[in-house]
Image (cartoon, rainbow, N blue to C red):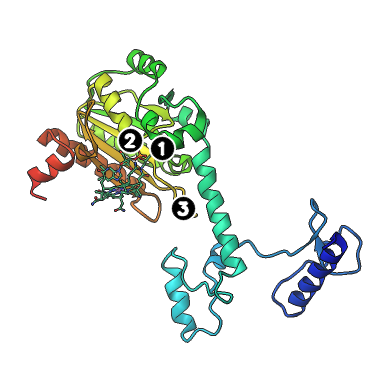
Amino acid sequence: MDDQTLDSLVRRVTEELSARGLINPDPAYNPQGSSSSVMKDPVTNWPGVDLPDPATLAERNHPGVLSPTDPEGLSALMSVTPARIGVGKAGARYRTHSWLLFQADFAVTQDTLSRDVDADLLEQYHLFTVQSAVSGGRQEYLLRPDLGRQLSSEAINQITSRCQTSPNLQICVGDGLSAAAIEANLSRILPVIVQGAASASLTVGTPFYIRNCRVGIMNGIGDLLKPDVLILLIGERPGLGRADSMSAYMAYRPKTGDTDAERDVICNIYDGGTNPLEAGAYTVQLARKMIEKQASGIRLKQMEGA
Ligand code: B12
């Protein structure tokens, strides 16, 4: 099919959809000076359709089921969950709207996975930056979790020379799988932990930021700094459209050889999940319990009979 035939075909389809009120091409947008109301994409110069942004709350909650039995009930259900319900279908397939929303949400995930935490934020909280043993960027980080669990030799030197040893609490921040999660929550959780520690008379070590970080890196930090409790604030694996969820992984006297069985996690820290202020308070409470019982993870749970 040549460009002209394709162009006229797309034009006919968009005009028909427009006439049926299913799309809303903007008649004012007409860079080609054509008499048709069909717009052209400014880059490709092909006829285009100006669909509404599918990622807005109103569009997300817009029911896609044609003639639902209980429209109010369906809207109510859709408004209480981010799950993709009530989206309708076109034959056996997703609607274009669902497909575009999926792509938009996936872009959020891709973006947060591939970028670094805002340097201004790190500076604001006086966090110096060290690297894990990942040296080949985010692609290597994703493919080699083992490297994300080790400190680079440069990091070992920096931590050794700049950090106080044997504090009650050592706070570290890691990008993990979401830079956006750190940006969304750090400024609310960090001051609460620091203030909570002060009122509990717990000493806090020198905090720092670890780029390309995995949870297992806690062991190496524990070997170097010997804190009673290590708190690692780290970005969680992003969900579709949800990139701002952070975790606080914690361990009592972490050391080489420890596994997740020796760790605890306070998860889903974000507005709408575990509130970051509450999570900060709970982090200090749990740290105190770890110090009192001299244990974390499964051992701590066993002591509590949980
Ligand atoms: C990915 C994941 C896993 C993967 C981890 C594999 C991997 N290499 O990534 C698998 C499927 C193995 C897994 C297993 C479990 N998980 Co999980 N997991 C997650 C998930 C979806 C993302 C975690 C993440 O982004 N971590 C950050 C990145 C940067 O860390 P990482 O270094 O790449 O990976 C480490 C952590 O993910 C850690 N981890 C994963 N799950 C858990 C659970 C606990 C209790 C601990 C201490 C560590 C831990 O293990 C990885 C290796 O060290 C979270 C959901 C969430 N909202 O966070 C649940 C989540 C953390 N998991 C949870 C649970 C309960 C478990 C299990 C105990 C389930 C079970 N009954 O077997 C096991 C424990 C496994 C273990 N490591 O000992 C819960 C924790 C709830 C809580 N507050 O205690 C969460 C929050 C899910 C939930 N909402 O219920 N998990």
Q: Amino acid at mark 3?
A: Arg
Q: From the viewer's perspective, is residue 213 above or below residue 206?
A: below
Q: Secondary structure at mark 3?
A: loop
Say few, some or many: other residues with alpha carbon within 10 Å of mark 3 (under 14 / 14 to 19 / 20 or more): some
Closer to the N terminus: mark 2 or mark 3? 2
Residue visible at 52% across and 39% down in the picture = 114
- Between label 2 and label 3, give the one nearer the viewer: 2
The N terminus: image quadrant: bottom right
Label 2 near ligand 1 (CB < 8 Å): yes
Residue visible at 40% across and 48% down in the picture = 245
The answer to whether 187 appears left or right of 277 in the picture is: right
Q: Amino acid at mark 1?
A: Gly
| Residue 191: quarter of image | top left
Q: Are marks 2 and 1 in contact (CB under 8 Å)?
A: yes
* Residue 104 seen from this side: yes
Q: Which residue is mark 2?
A: 215
Q: Which residue is mark 3?
A: 242
Task: Name the spot of residue 164 as percent of width and height, x first.
Answer: 29, 18
Label 3 near ligand 1 (CB < 8 Å): no
Residue in front for this viewpoint, 89 or 116: 89
